[in-house]
Image (cartoon, rainbow, N blue to C red):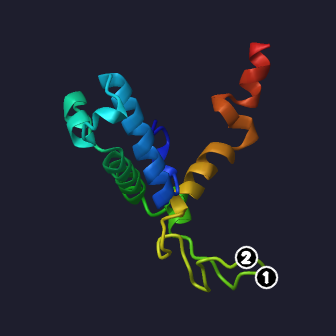
Amino acid sequence: MLHGSETWPVRKENEVALQRAEMRMARWMCNVNIKDRVPSKELRERLGIDDIILILQQNRLQWYGHVMRKENTDWVKKCMEYEVEGSRPRGRPGTGSPGWSWTKGRKTVGVVVVVYLTTYLQPRNTYGGFSSTGVEDMM
């Protein structure tokens, strides 16, 4: 349920939806109806699980620590610390201003960019773990 949650930009509505889905599954696993009025805390204790929001926060902090431990010359860390120059063009206003960076904003948005860059912007000759010569050799 939390696959890739390290990079999700989570709002309060998303947290509420995750908690509702988690409790719906917990009630189903314990064969408890909502009309039985069993508290969520008790269901979590029965199943031995933690609150999904706590786990989500731990995942995000673990990923952030992973990125911060990288060398300063690593491009992933450079993306995280990149500062945008200039001002935004006309259109929908953002939270940024001149000198705004991913880590200075209200949300750590840089993690999303880092994952996007590491997933989709690989050189074509090595995309998917194969070199272009390796694919030709397989055919």
Q: Nearer the viewer, residue 87 or 51?
A: 51
In the rendered view, tell whether residue 7 sits above or below residue 138.
below
Give the residue displayed 40% in from the left and 51% down from the top: 63
Q: Which amino acid lies under the numbered mark 2 shown in the image of this protein? A: Arg
User: Image quadrant of residue 120?
Assistant: top right
In the rendered view, tell whether residue 132 sits above or below residue 11.
above
Q: Nearer the viewer, residue 42 or 48?
A: 42
Q: Which amino acid lies under the numbered mark 1 shown in the image of this protein? A: Arg
Residue 92: image tag: 2
In the rendered image, residue 26, in percent from the top left (x then y), is placed at: 34, 31
Q: Nearer the viewer, residue 84 or 112?
A: 112
Asked whether residue 129 appears in the rendered view, the answer is: yes
Residue 110: image tag: none
**Quarter of the image containing the C terminus?**
top right
* Helix, strand or loop at mark 2: loop
Q: Nearer the viewer, residue 1 or 28?
A: 28
In the rendered image, residue 125, in percent from the top left (x then y), is placed at: 74, 36
- What residue would you read off at disc 1? 90
Q: Residue furthest top?
A: 139
In the rendered view, tell whether residue 61 sits above or below residue 126.
below
Q: CA distance from mark 2 to mark 1?
A: 7 Å
In the rendered view, tell whether residue 126 sits above or below residue 32.
below
Give the residue displayed 46% in from the left and 35% down from the top: 1
Mark 1 Cα shell of 10 Å, populated few (<14), some (14-19), many (≥20): few
In the rendered image, residue 24, in percent from the top left (x then y), is placed at: 41, 34
In the rendered image, residue 18, in percent from the top left (x then y), is placed at: 45, 45
Tell me if 104 is positioned left or right of 99 in this view: left
Give the residue displayed 43% in from the left and 55% down from the top: 67
